[in-house]
Image (spheres, rainbow, N blue to C red):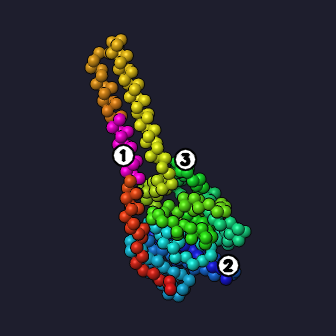
Amino acid sequence: MKKISVIVPMYNEEKVVELCYDRLTKILQGIKEYEYEIIAINDGSKDDTLEILENFAKQDIKLKILSFSRNFGHQAALTAGLKEVTGDVIVIIDADLQDPPELIPQMIKLWEQGNEVIYGKRKSRKGESHFKLLTAKIFYETLNALSDVEMPKDTGDFRLVDRKVVDVINSLPEHNKFLRGLFSWVGYNQVAFEYERQERIAGKTKYPLKKMLKLASDGIISFSTKPLKLVGGLGIISIVISICILIYALVSYIFKLNNLSAGWTSIMVSITFFAGIQLLSIWVMSEYIGRIYEETKQRPQYIIEKRINFN
Ligand code: UDP
Ligand code: MG
């Protein structure tokens, strides 16, 4: 019998764990032709998420738990889950049920028809602030403009993937994996699955602005070196501007258009302008160097403190 593995990352989700477990179990039990397992990753929650999960896991060996020693982040949690799955088809879903588990059977149908990656595409997003919608839009537009890989818009981590795609992702040596990007980068038969994104059933978003910015910069930097090339462009622009200033200075000197003290302004303007460009360029480069440094340390992306129901 074929098996479905469901990966659910959880960070301070005590308010939603029970509902999430119930709804997922109900749906998965309803798919009679398949066995299933649920892998919940407790990403260093500070509330009772782990205790609640453990209670369910005592009565249900299909619920497996990986618990991190601290909060390592959403992408790390998913990466850990992907390493442990034993199913033939893998579903990644958020704990807050914004992506309805009721869609899984339809996604399975698409998989049975030979699609290897079925990614959820949000037709609408209920209950999310204008700020979130706007930042998400800017993020996807920038990412696509900069990246060499086409990444579908309005797509999060909710997807159903074939085992062989997961094997490819697991075999990639990079540590800091930006999974949304990698899932489109791998290729294979991909198909979008449109759905209405629901409101969070309880609790608050675990993505404050700081984490969103981190995710966005990880996405851009791990999929594009264009920012580095843009730095070169800035250099050229600044050279052109400085030549213009030089010509202006010469012309005004020859034709005595200016008195001498006026030179002060142009010097100050050009010094601050070039200093700004240099600092900006160094910042862009250091973002890359910082990540190269992180990768060379070969430190694991997460530490698993506890494993439950794995044998
Ligand atoms: N999450 C996680 N670690 C984190 C942040 C989030 O495991 O550091 C989980 C969270 O519990 C949820 C999923 O990632 O299951 C998506 O987070 P959330 O719903 O808060 O993000 P949003 O839907 O608001 O973008
Ligand atoms: Mg959410």
Label 1, ligand 1: CB separation under 8 Å:
no
Q: Earlier in the sequence, mark 1 or mark 2?
A: 2
Q: Residues within 10 Å of mark 2 (few under 14, many from 20)?
A: some
User: Which one is closest to the eye, mark 1 or mark 2?
Assistant: 1
Q: Label 1 vs label 3: CA separation?
A: 22 Å
Mark 1 — residue?
A: 282
What is the number of the mark on residue 31? 2
Direction from residue 208 to residue 120 in the image, left or right: right
The three-letter code of the residue at mark 2 reads Ile
The three-letter code of the residue at mark 3 reads Ala
Q: Which residues are magenta?
A: 274-288
Which quarter of the picture shows residue 21?
A: bottom right
Expressed as whole percent of the image width and height from the top left, the position of residue 253 reads: 33, 15
Expressed as whole percent of the image width and height from the top left, the position of residue 46 reads: 39, 72
Q: Label 3 vs label 2: CA separation?
A: 40 Å
What is the number of the mark on residue 145? 3
Say whether residue 123 is visible: yes
How many numbered dots are placed on residues in this image?
3
Callout 1–callout 2 Cβ contact below 8 Å: no
User: Which one is closest to the eye, mark 1 or mark 3?
Assistant: 1
On whether residue 214 falls in the magenta region, the answer is no
Residues 83 and 58: in front is 83
